[in-house]
Image: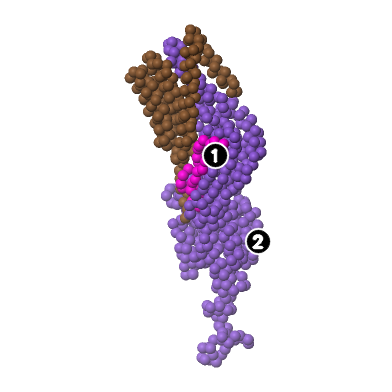
Chain colours: A brown, B purple
Amino acid sequence: MVGVTGYELVRRPSRRSVAVAGLAGTFAVVASVPGGPLPTGLALGGVVVLLAGVRLGRHGVVDSGALVAFGGVVAAALSGTGAVTVVFGTVAAVVAWDSGTSAVSLSDQVGGDADTLRVEALHALVGAGVGLVGGIVGFVLFRVGPTRQPVTTLFVLLLAAAVLVVALNR
Amino acid sequence: MTYNRPYDSDSAAGTAGTGDGTATPATDGGTEATADTAGGSTAETTSETTPESGTRSPATTRRTNRWVGVAGLSFLTAGLGVATSTRPLVLAAVVGVAYLAYANVASAPSPSLSVARTVSDATPEPGDEVRVTVSVTNTGDASLPDLRAVEQVPQALSVVEGPARAATALRPGATMTFAYTVTARRGEYAFDGLTAIVRNASGSEEREFDLRTPATTVTCVPPVDATEAVPLHALTSRYVGRVSTDTAGDGVEFASLREYQHGDPLSRIDWNQYARDGSLATMEFREERMATVVLLLDLRPEAYVQSGEEGRNAVERSIDATHRMFNSLLDTGDRVGVAALSNDDIWLAPGAGPTHQAEARHLLATHPALSPTPPAERVYIRPALRMLAGRLPDDAQVVFCSPMVDGAAAYVARRLHVRGHPVTVVSPDPTRRDTVGRTLASVERSNRTSDLRATGLRVIDWPDDESLYEALERARRRWSA
């Protein structure tokens, strides 16, 4: 009379989730173009791996893809790309990774067939906003702040800021 | 031992996923966080109990640790920037620190939610599709940037369309709605649970809790269905019925001739014999009497077996058979009752009439012990037998529905038989012969039924691919021949 076969939960993100991460990834690739062919290739390869990881629903693949893509942005920075472009590329790489892993965890918990576009888009937008605000603040500090200080001092300052942020939360 | 028990594996989607794949259990933060949210969150929900909001389990708070890598990476970048005197890289590290702050400033909100459900049909027939619509409203003051809701579908029901889950962002006062379809099967089911997982905006922390709401019930009662005439033993009550007995008296079927006694009705005098030799003789017929039948269900966990990966288990088939036999026995004028080998007290004393029929129909459809999922505890048959023996009327015969997969079932049948209650075993056959082990189990079972037949019990073997009607008909032909 009644069989017990039924709907099976798809534990892989939908194409729409891939599109959200793909959009951010494209920006990361664009940002590494001024660095030359090697950084561009690195970023492009990383983004492709990241998107594949999203589609497969594998956290590890997404992480490694994002790492390679960010490596492309770093390579571009090392070959003399401007600060604005590098910050932009960094934010794009982080947003791509963030929306990718978030999509994977969503598909894990609610399934790829559920309508998750709203929460994913919001997550990506807020993530991009945070990155851009952070980038602008940093940029302003670099312009207006103690530019004569050696870079090591800046690094120590950065470290202090990070420790403060973590300590405040505990 | 070799019967399949794949029952649980393919039931509906029930519980939440295990969470973020990267979320390794926090070494020290996790447990500490759980402890301090448990008190706070429950206090908050009890203070605002809207009719639908229900109760809430203590929340489990987990750190997903997804931003840990970003922190490390930004310091690496900063170090590289310092080493190579590349200012853009140090700037990129500032972005990393901004994300670190983003991940750490806010914790997962402690939401208050209200849940409402509607079902397309609260009293479906078996096999009907029921659409369940779930609305989740954020009744708190805080926005929920990432809310994931997982409906706790009753275990025996299977979801056929749409995930019974959803994720969205909810403003205060906003509602999200999702719907899914289940296939109804016999029983009474309560939709009353929802697992909610709430994350903060950065996803660095998530809070998971169960929300109990007033149940929306779906009651699925099979239609009255009686097609099979059940072959019965000759033990009967003293009331007129349909089972022919060896007692001579009123009836239809000729039994014997005896010498005329004063007062015998004229209609029963054998006038042919009187014409032949002038002596008076009275014809006697087989009396037809009413039988009292108790249908006994085997609800021990051992009986929840099925042949193959899909299809119904033996208990489901037994209940279906009981339902049909009950109705057909009532139709033929017998008194029928229902009992079960179960830890729950299932007993419907033999009776007749429409009220009795309705009672049995409701019992067989909705009693929780008759659900398609096996009970958690084992059933001890001796106390169950003692209880049953005390209740069975003296003239009752028993129709025992059991897959006969172990010696205990045979023991029950034999015990009842020797107590003077003739037993007919209707046995849904759950065995298969596709592997050596299964063949062995199948042979063991058929040996068991042969032994029972040898001791005078009737066993009706009911294969999976045959209808109950065919099985009963085959048995009746064999017994009347």
Which tag is nearer the camera, tag 2 or tag 1? 1
Q: Does B153 sit above or below residue B386?
A: above
Q: Main secondary structure of the magenta part?
A: strand
Tell whether position B161 is magenta: yes
Task: Pinpoint residue B405: horizontal percent, then vertical percent.
Answer: 52, 53
Q: Which residue is drawn at 48% across and 54% down?
A: B128
Task: Pinpoint residue B211: horizontal percent, then vertical percent.
Answer: 59, 41
Q: 10 Å neighbourhood of mark 2: few (<14), some, or many (≥20)? A: few
To the question of a shared chain for discs 2 and 1, the answer is yes
Task: Pinpoint residue B421: horizontal percent, then vertical percent.
Answer: 60, 64
Q: Which mark is residue B391?
A: 2
Label 1 element class: loop
Is residue A35 among what the camera can see?
yes
Q: Does B397 sit above or below residue A91?
A: below
The extreme front residue here reads A144
Q: In this view, does B232 lie to the left or right of B83?
A: right
Residue placed under numbered mark 1 in the picture: B174
Among the two numbered marks 2 and 1 on one chain, the one whose residue lies closer to the N terminus: 1
Task: Pinpoint residue B169: horizontal percent, then vertical percent.
Answer: 51, 35
Query: Label 1 lies in what chain?
Result: B
Q: Which residue is drawn at 45% across and 18% down?
A: B92
- The magenta stretch spans which residues? B157-184
Tell whether position B410 is magenta: no
Is residue B294 among what the camera can see?
no
Q: What residue type is labelled 1?
A: Ala
Q: What residue type is labelled 2?
A: Arg
Q: Residue B143 carries which label?
A: none
Of A133 and B115, nearer the camera is A133
Q: Does B192 sit above or below residue A168?
A: below
Of B173 and B401, nearer the camera is B173
Q: Quadrant of the C terminus of chain A?
A: top right
